[in-house]
Amino acid sequence: MTNPSADWQARQYTLFEAERTRPVRDLLNATQVSAARTAVDLGCGPGNSTETLLACAPDARVTGVDNSRDMIDAAKKRLPHVDFQLADIAAWDAEGPFDLILANASLQWVPDHETLMPKLVGRLAQGGQLAVQMPDNLDEPAHRLMREVAADGPWRDKLKGAERTARYRADWYYSLLKPQCARVDVWRTTYHHPLQGGVDAIIEWFSGSGLRPFLAKLDAQETTAYLDRYRAGLKAAYTVLDDGTVLLPFPRIFIVATR
């Protein structure tokens, strides 16, 4: 595998589009999205979440926002009639008000949730909803091994700070958002994604997400060595079924906050 660029790659992300899209469908099913007339998809990626949003609210005026040119280009190709904007979520300053703000698997990359999330609620119309889904899998072997391999190799200095470690519990988000909201629903679901191709399929999955901050700092030779160690750890941690399938447990936290 060649060393990826620092930018997100839409093609890599969409290798597992069906699995990545299921959580956003589950999230939107817990909202009043069909009544939304103005909506924004923060961290829209290649447009799969935006497309799901539009299917639920076909009459809504929807904007997609992402900080990756590669993702925005893919989203525009997929949904040419939608307004997609290249912007950082943390610096996004549209005033609204919005009936729905969707953030599907994006806010885990954005710091300072204590400030950011109340600010997003403040851009909702009365009765509007902030709908958030974030991976909650940092204790899973696939993520733990990323950190362990990074800390135990000749690249340790290069990879200091590459890991994503900041996260909060459900009760923290509830307590943060409830003073501004009429209702806050928080829940956690663990999906078991069937991946074909043994542990290499796990590497392919995370090459489009969690592995990228690590691999982006390595040259081609280091990338190969890092992934060899990572693969060996995965083989010890995950069971490959007789048909070559690996079930990848993937916990996710969901939040629907209604203003």
Image (cartoon, rainbow, N blue to C red):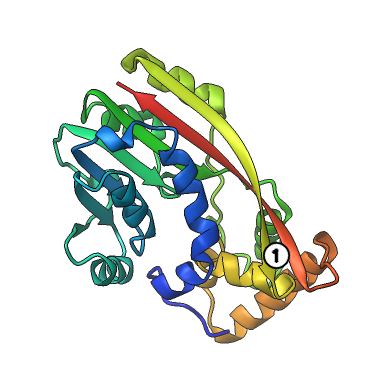
Q: Is residue 243 above or below residue 37?
A: below
Q: Quadrant of the C terminus?
A: top left
Q: Give the mark count.
A: 1
Picture residue at 47% right of the left edge, 24% below the top:
185
Query: In the figure, residue 148 lies in which quadrant?
Result: bottom right
Residue situated in front as seen by the camera: 52 or 238: 52
- Residue 197 locus on image (x, y percent): 71, 76
Write down the residue under mark 1.
Answer: 149
One can see residue 195 in this view: yes
Picture residue at 34% right of the left edge, 14% below the top:
182
Q: Is residue 156 above or below residue 140?
A: below
Picture residue at 84% right of the left edge, 64% below the top:
236
Residue situated in front as seen by the camera: 19 or 239: 19
Q: Quadrant of the N terminus?
A: bottom right
- Residue 10 locus on image (x, y percent): 40, 70
- Residue 108 locus on image (x, y percent): 46, 46
Q: Is residue 79 above or below residue 254?
A: below
Residue 118 appears left or right of 222: left
- Residue 251 locus on image (x, y percent): 63, 44
Residue 124 appears left or right of 56: left
Residue situated in front as seen by the camera: 25 or 171: 25
Picture residue at 71% right of the left edge, 69% below the top:
230
Q: Secondary structure at mark 1?
A: helix
One can see residue 9 in this view: no
Residue type beneath disc 1: Val
How crowded pointer 1 is (Cα within 10 Å; few <14, some 14-19, many 20+) is rated as: some
